[in-house]
Image (spheres, grey):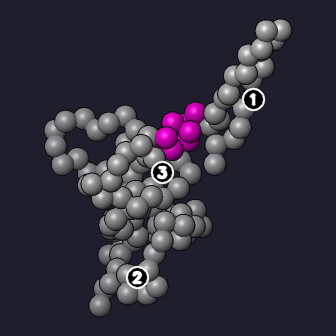
């Protein structure tokens, strides 16, 4: 049994567990670049994401299939080729901008409220 088989035969990984592992065990877990299956350039939001990966017994990072992770904050999503992209695009926008702004206008003044991205 390889270390990867052992990893996946232990309690199943969840998006939240993968995020914690990427944040706290950086020697063993990393986000690796998306492999390009075509010569066409990837959508812009893909630049924010990669695949979570675990180091195997040969010190090579192997993709944890079924997930994508943000390269900035390690937020991890379940992913397949049939996944819709709206939530990924929203996260990419929030994470790359750092804040979201809401502008409230009234007849007398204008104010802006910012909230931190999660």
Magenta residues? Answer: 90-97
Q: Residue, x 63% and y 48% (percent of image)?
A: 118
Residue 1 horizontal side relative to residue 15, left or right:
left
Label 1 sits on a secondary structure element that is strand
Q: Estimate how packed mark 1 is, as few (under 14), some (14 to 19) or many (20 or more) residues with alpha carbons within 10 Å.
A: few
Q: Residue 4, can we see it?
A: yes
Q: Position of residue 79 (x, y in %)?
A: 36, 58
Q: Position of residue 56 (x, y in %)?
A: 35, 75
Q: Residue, x 53% and y 55% (percent of image)?
A: 75
Q: Position of residue 64 (x, y in %)?
A: 36, 68
Q: Is residue 118 rendered magenta in the image?
A: no
Residue 112 horizontal side relative to residue 101, left or right:
right
Q: Earlier in the sequence, mark 1 or mark 3?
A: 3
Find the distance from the CA under tag 1 to the CA under tag 3: 25 Å
Label 3 sits on a secondary structure element that is strand
Name the outermost residue toward the bottom. 1
Q: Residue 21, can we see it?
A: no
Q: Earlier in the sequence, mark 1 or mark 2?
A: 2
Residue 104 horizontal side relative to residue 30, left or right:
right
Name the outermost residue toward the top. 108
Residue assigned mark 2? 7
Q: Point out which mark residue 70 bears.
A: 3
- Relative height, residue 73 to residue 6 (above, below): above
Q: Nearer the viewer, mark 1 or mark 2?
A: 1
Find the distance from the CA under tag 1 to the CA under tag 2: 44 Å
Residue assigned mark 1? 113
Q: Estimate how packed mark 2 is, as few (under 14), some (14 to 19) or many (20 or more) residues with alpha carbons within 10 Å.
A: few
Find the distance from the CA under tag 3 to the CA under tag 2: 22 Å
């Amino acid at each position: 049994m390889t270390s990867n088989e052992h990893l996946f035969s232990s309690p199943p990984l969840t998006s939240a567990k993968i995020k914690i592992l990427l944040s706290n065990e950086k020697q063993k877990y990393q986000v690796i670049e998306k492999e390009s299956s075509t010569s066409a350039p990837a959508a812009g939001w893909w630049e924010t994401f990669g695949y979570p990966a675990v180091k195997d017994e040969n010190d090579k990072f192997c993709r944890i299939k079924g997930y994508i992770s943000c390269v900035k904050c390690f937020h991890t999503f379940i992913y397949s080729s049939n996944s819709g992209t709206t939530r990924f695009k929203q996260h990419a926008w929030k994470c790359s901008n750092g804040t979201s702004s809401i502008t409230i206008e009234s007849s007398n003044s204008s104010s802006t409220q910012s909230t931190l991205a999660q």
